[in-house]
Image (cartoon, coloured by chain):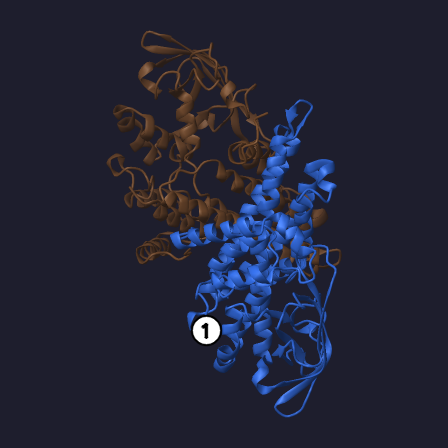
Chain colours: A brown, B blue
Amino acid sequence: MDFDLSPEEYAFRDEVRRFLDEHLPPADRRGPGFMEAWLRKVRERRWVGFGWPEEYGGGGASVMKQAILREEMTKRKAPPLGTCIMGLQWVGPAIIQYGTEAQKRRFIPDILDSKYQWCTGYSEPATGSDLAALQCKAVRDGDVYVVNGQKIWTSIAMWSKWMILLVRTTTQVENKHDGITCLLVEMDRPGIEVRPIRNMAGAEIFAEVFFDNVRVPADQRLGEEDDGWKVTVSALAHERSGISEVTSLMRTLEDVKALARMCVRHGRPALEDAAIRRRIARAETRIEAMRLNGLRFLTRQLRGEPLSSETSINKLHRAELEIELGELALELEGSRGQYTRGGPAAVAGGRWQQFALSWPEVVIGGGTPNIQKNIIAERILGLPKD
Amino acid sequence: VNFGFTEEQQLLRRQIRRFLDDRCPLAEVRRLMETDAGYSQELWREMSGLAWVGLTVPEEFGGAGLGWVDLLIVLEETGRTLFPSPLIATTLASAALLRAGSESQQRRFLPALADGSAIGTLAIHDDPDTPGPGGITMRGTGAAGGLRVSGTKRVVMDPEAATLAIVGIRTGEAPEEIALALIDCSAPGVHAEAFPTMDRTKRLGNLTLTDVTTDREALLCSGPAAVRMLDVLESLGAVAVTGEAVGAAEGAHALTVVYARDRRQFGRPIGQYQGVKHPLAEMYVDIESFKSLVYFAAWAADREPAALPRAASCAKAYAAEAFARIGIDGVQLHGAVGYTDEFDIQLYLKRAKWVRPAFGDADHHYDRVATLGAL
C-alpha cells in the first residue's frame, strides 16, 4: 500500500502545475481570446483525449497520468480541456473501440478539436432506468436505416451536430438486450425535430427528439447490427475512478465552509453551532471516503482490471453529497436563502439556490440511486434480480 | 499510488483467517465469552508464537517489525469472527512504549509484550468520556523521583488480563500538567475489576490504584509531550477499533446477505425485494467506505504521521455511525430469529455497542475533523 506518486508521476504533476501557473490566469483576468487560446494549448500538449491512442491524435497516456491531469485541472478550477463534452466522455471511446477505420478518421479528430457537439439519444419516454426496453425503431432499406420514434432527456440536443442513437432493429427477441443497434446521426437530417424541455432550475438543457422516417446511411452504424447494447455498455462502462468528481466536491465543500464562516444562525455565528460543524465534517468524511475509494478503483485499473459495478459506491455518495451540500448551504443562509439570482437580495448572487435545484442532473442523470443499489445488490452481493 | 496488498499481506490474511476458522469459530467464541477470563490463553500463546501479537513491534525487541497496515489485516479478521483477545489493548500499550518510551523502557517491556507473555492496556482516563488531558484527574503527589497516586481508571480494556498498564496522572492544575506512566498490575495497591458488558467478547472495567508509587523509570512522558501522546494514542486506538469494525461489519453483512438469499416469504427469497436488497447495498457502500478510510489512516500511522489525526477521525466517525446501523438493520432483516440468542447476528449488534464509544464516538471525531478542517 502506497499513496505516494512515483518520481516520474511527480515530474508530470509539476509539469501540469507549471503549465497552469503560466497559462491559467485568475477568472477575473481572462481576456476575450482566453478560451480559444486555452483549448489550443491543451490540445497542443495532447492533453485532450489524453488516454486515447496516439495514432488518432490522443495522448496515449497511462491511467495514472490521466488521473493526475484531471486532479490538477479540477483543483485549479481550470476550464474543460474541450467543449465537446459527450464526445470526449463516451462517444469518442466508443468509436475508438467499435468504429470502422473510416469512422475513426472521420470523427475522432473533430471530437479532439471540439469542432461540434455530440448528444446522446438513449432514454425514451417509456424507458428511463430500463434502458434496454427502448422502442425507437430502425428498418433497413437498402443502404440506409429508416428511423421512427422518440427520444427524451437528450441533453444539448438543440446545440448538437451529431447524435449517438440507440434504435431497435429487431423486435422479436428473447432477451431485450438483443436487437438493438447503435447509429451515428447528423441532427440536421430531414425528419428530426428537437423540442427543448425546461428544467426546474429554469434552464433549457435537455430536449425531446422526434424521428419521422429519418434516413441514416448504413455506414454510420457503430458496431454490428443488433449488437448495439454491447457498444452502449462499453461506453457507459468507460467508468473512471471518479477522481475529478471528488476534487470538484471538495471545492464545493470549501465554498460551504466559507459560507458558514460568514453566516449567523439563531443569533450566533454558524460555526459555533455543533450540529452545523458536524454536518460539514460528515460531508467532508464522505468526500474523503470517495477520494480513497477512487484510489482503490484506480489501483484496480493500474493492474489492468476493468471497473464495473463497484463504481456505484461513489455514485451513491456523490448523489447524497450533491443534495446535502445544497441543502446545507440554504440552511446556513436561513430565511434569505429563498432569494434567487435576478434580484438584489440573493446571498452570494443566488449561487446556492441554483446549486440546490441542479442536483437531478447528476443524481438522476447517471442512473438513479435506487438503480445503483440494485446494481450493487444484484451484481456484487449476488441477490436475486427482481 | 497503490491501494492494494502485497503477496505477503494476502498470505497473512489467509493464515489468520484459516487459524480463526479452524481454532475459534463462533461456537467457540460463544463458549469463551462465558468464561471468567473471557479469552483463550492457549490461543493467545499460539497467536503470539505466530508473531501476530508483536506484529508492529520492531524485530530488535522480538516483534515482527511490520506496520499498521499489516496489523489492520489481522484486526479485520479477528473482528470478522468476534475473536476475543487482548490484542488491541496490548498493541496500543506497545505503541505507547515505542513512541514515548526510553530505550531502557523499551528493552525492558517490549519483548514480553511482543511474545504475549505480558498483556498491556491503556488506563489513561478517569473519565473516559472526557477525551484529552481533561479526562485525567488522578493526582500524583510528589516524592522526589516518584509519584504517589490513588484513583480509579474507568472503562479500561481487558483490565483483569492486563499485566502492564499505561496510566494517566495529573501533576498540576493546568491542562497540560499530566504524565503517562507504566504500572505493573501485580504491584500492591493495584486492583482490576471487569464488569458485565453488552458485548461479552470484550472485557471492560476499572483499574483502581491505592497508594501506588511510580518511580522515575516508570515515567513515559509528561507535559506537552504527554498531551501529544494522548492525541496519537486516541488516533491509533480509533484506527485499531475501526479495523476490527470493518471485519465485524463484513461478518454481520455476510450473515444477513446469506439469510436474505435463503429465506423465502410470499413465494420469493426476501433478498429479491428492494426493501431488503437496498439496505444490504447501503451497508456494502458504508463498509467499503470506512474500510478505505481506515486503511489510509493505517498507512498514515506508518508513513505520514501528520495525516493520521484527520484520517483516523474520518474512519472512526464513519464506522461508529455506520456499524451501529448495520448491527440494527442486520437483526431487523433477519426478522424474529434475529432477536433470538441462537442466531449469531445479535452478537454483531452488540459488538457495535463496543465500537461506538471506544476512543471517541462519531460526534467526537466529527468535531475533530471540523477543527482539523479549519472550522
**Residue B118 versus residue B238 in the image, above or below:** below
Q: Does A58 sit left or right of B148 as displayed? A: left
**Residue B188 versus residue A47 in the image, above or below:** below
Where does the image place residue A352, in percent across and percent down from the top left? 61, 45
**Label total for image:** 1
Residue ID for mark 1: B61
Viewport quadrant of the C terminus of chain A: top right
Query: Closer to the camera, A307 or A79?
Result: A307
Query: Closer to the camera, B363 or B75?
Result: B75
Where does the image place residue B288, in percent across and percent down from the top left? 54, 46
Query: Closer to the camera, A39 or B94?
Result: B94
Where does the image place residue A80, in percent across and percent down from the top left? 41, 42
Q: Does B7 sit left or right of A329 as displayed? A: left
Q: Residue furthest left?
A: A55
Residue drawn 53% across and 76% down?
Answer: B109
Residue drawn 65% across and 77% down?
Answer: B186
For the question of whether residue A349 can be seen, the reply is: no
Q: Residue furthest top?
A: A141
Mark 1, other Cα within 10 Å: few <14 / some 14–19 / many ≥20 = some
What amino acid is labelled 1 in the image? Phe
Q: Residue furthest bottom?
A: B144
Where does the image place residue A270, in percent across and percent down from the top left? 68, 57
**Residue B212 versus residue A252 in the image, above or below:** below
Question: Which chain is disc 1 placed on?
Answer: B
Viewport quadrant of the N terminus of chain A: bottom left
The quadrant holding residue A191 is top left
The quadrant holding residue B331 is top right
Residue drawn 60% across and 37% down?
Answer: B257
Mark 1: secondary structure: helix
For the question of whether residue B223 can be seen, the reply is: yes
